[in-house]
Amino acid sequence: MREVILAKSAGFCFGVKRAVDTVYEQSERKNVYTFGPIIHNEEVVKDLEKKGVKVINLLKELENVKEGTIIIRSHGVSKKVYDELQQHGLEIVDATCPFVLKIHKIVKEESEKGKQIVIIGNENHPEVEGIKGWSKTPVTIVDTEEKARNIVLNHEQEVCIVSQTTFNYNKFKELVEIISEKGYNIIIRNTICNATEERQTEAREIAKRVDAMIVVGGSSSSNTRKLYEICKNECKDTFYIQTLNDLDMESLGKADCIGITAGASTPNNIIQEVYTNVRTEF
């Protein structure tokens, strides 16, 4: 009998569940918009579209919208975007993850004290773009060893380092260590959320034990991509899928033990469908 291990931490984190629940609650109303997809999961976004929720990616798309509700997604937005949304006169429902709001506050306060801000995270991720927009001083974004080694900051100014909430914890420590060796006056705020650390740690432990690993999540989900990288490092037969339809059962081969984890924006019904089918297939 083949064993299938499902990670306890798989699926929606607190911030994502809160944001998704908020949109479903608001979907009963007319003219509901989200600023960017509420989460990086195509299945959820499609379902909300069926309920009439429209995704706005650029502020100019709101030019002809005179009434309605705009929901700020879990990733948050920059101060500039927030201020401009207020000027449109629509009702704003802020579903930014509380852990992300905490980073906005840190960056705002520390930059007001004159500190340079370093964000450990993916430059093009909406969460990082939002965090950057709360700083009053120059911001440097680092996500690779090369960028950390080549970083050039002002030695006469203090530096505050924060992290994208879903960044790889071990990689965060490595990059901070490299920057710390340069002799800057640094304060480090590890703003990776606990749920991310737990999810990554559990995924790594499961991947070490199994013959094959399945990671479930949206193709544009940053935290799912990091889970895949972590698992692939421990288990060569690691598969990244969005739904059960993407899973080729034959590719699991003769695996006696299979692990399953999922990103923070993966709905429980998709995880359970994969889990149930992998168990019954064998």
Image: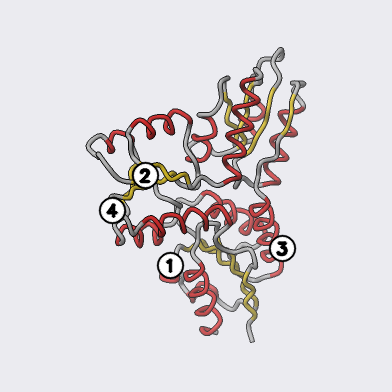
Task: Give the structural element (helix, strand or loop) at label 4.
Answer: loop
Which of discs 3 and 2 lies nearer the camera? The answer is 2
> Given contact means CB atoms under 8 Å apart, are the residues at marks 2 and 1 in contact?
no
Which of discs 4 and 3 lies nearer the camera? The answer is 4
Question: How far apart are the alpha carbons under marks 2 and 4?
Answer: 11 Å
- Measured along the vertical axis of the image, is residue 222 above or below residue 277? above
- Per the rendering, the mark at residue 30 is 4
Name the residue carrying label 1: 246
> Residue shown at 39%/62% (left/top)?
43
Q: Position of residue 55 (x, y in %)?
A: 33, 48
Sooner in the amino-acid sequence: mark 2 or mark 1: 2
Residue 215 falls left or right of residue 173: left
Name the residue carrying label 2: 70
> Residue shown at 39%/45% (left/top)?
36
Q: Residues within 10 Å of mark 1 (few under 14, many from 20)?
A: few
> Residue shown at 29%/57% (left/top)?
52
Amino acid residing under circle 4 = Lys
- Which image quarter: residue 146? top right
Q: Residues within 10 Å of mark 4 (few under 14, many from 20)?
A: few
